[in-house]
Amino acid sequence: MPARAARLAARAPLHPAWTLLTALALVLLTALTARAEDRVFRVGYQKYGTLVLLKGKGLLEKKLAPLGYRVQWAEFPAGPQLLESLNAGAVDFGSAGEAPPIFAQAASPNLVYVAAEPPAPKGEAILVKADSPIRTVADLRGRTVALNKGSNVHFLLVRALEEAGVPYEEIKTAFLTPADGAAAFARGAVDAWVIWDPYQASGERSTGARTLVNGEGLAPNRQFYLSRRDFADQNRKAVDALIEAVGEIDAWAKDNTDAVATELAPSVGIPAPILAVALRRQSYGVAPLDAAAIADQQRVADTFHKLKLLPKPITVSDAVWKPGS
């Protein structure tokens, strides 16, 4: 019995009826305390996105408290690290773009897609300098293109080259993080940079970059919410409550772009006016994965397997979580 419960018991009335009632109350209190301590919902988030807004508003805590959960938040630098932690059981839920879940599913059959945001194809692009002689994707032949390996924009680059009839092997790739890619692009060390928001918006503002192509007609650029199958199956109400909370944040963010930009600017390190540009290219409206989302993800998976970046083929539909399953 916890120390506090023991002290209360020591002061309990001696009347048998009251003693019994007090004992029952203490047992219930102890059980509820233990339950609250045991039921922890661990959410991984990144500096930019809906989950960091959800954390700031405290909405998830309000929704989960009546269900007997408390929330633990863990920040990650990017989707791959977050999903690696998810697969390892260090967090229970998180979000990432199209590419990281592909690799995470290949690593663990326990990973599941819980929900997705609508496509946001304008939120990623191939950028070139304003005075660059490169006018079309076909002009990238023989040029050096900076990108983050195995990311959403890697898929965008492959699709853009396919559409332009340029073999992937006929460009030179420089695999760089967003920060290193930005630096290389700014000093002219690479000819083009394939990047996503908010770094895309920042690059456009700081260098006057020109968009060669964005994801429109090439790559959907969705955001996914993910969990582990065992956790989602055993905590269905909590997962449903989280998605409901995300929906409420989405509805607020869609109509309050400037407020969202101001809130995110300190953590992202990008001025609010630039973030506002990125946020206007973002999509809102979380929902279960539909056939189109699954088909698009399968195409991403098949593309990465063809490039030998994915160690084995996967079937995306196998990882789509069905509530109550």
Image (cartoon, rainbow, N blue to C red):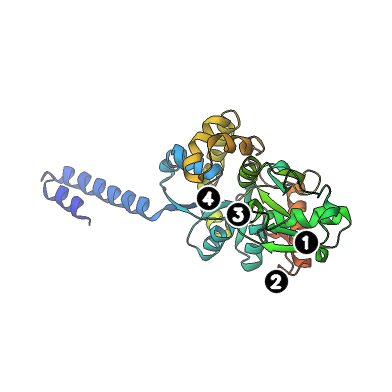
Circle nearer the N terminus (3, 1): 3
Task: Report how far apart the C-alphas of labels 3 and 1 lie in the structure.
Answer: 28 Å
Q: Give the numbered dot on residue 303.
A: 1
Q: Amino acid at mark 4?
A: Gln
Dot 2 surroundings within 10 Å: few (below 14), some, or many (20 or more)?
Answer: few
Q: Determine whether, in the image, residue 35 is placed left or right of residue 107.
A: left
Task: Report how far apart the C-alphas of labels 2 and 1 lie in the structure.
Answer: 12 Å
Q: Give the numbered dot on residue 183.
A: 3
Q: Amino acid at mark 3?
A: Ala
- Image coordinates of residue 25 in percent, x first then y, are 25, 45
Are dots 3 and 2 in contact, CB under 8 Å? no
Circle nearer the N terminus (3, 4): 4
User: Residue at point 64% right, 45% down?
Assistant: 203
Dot 3 falls on a residue whose secondary structure is helix
According to the image, label 2 marks what residue? 311
Dot 4 surroundings within 10 Å: few (below 14), some, or many (20 or more)?
Answer: many
Task: Report how far apart the C-alphas of labels 4 and 2 lie in the structure.
Answer: 26 Å
Of 150 and 54, which appears nearest the observer?
150
Of 263 and 166, which appears nearest the observer?
166
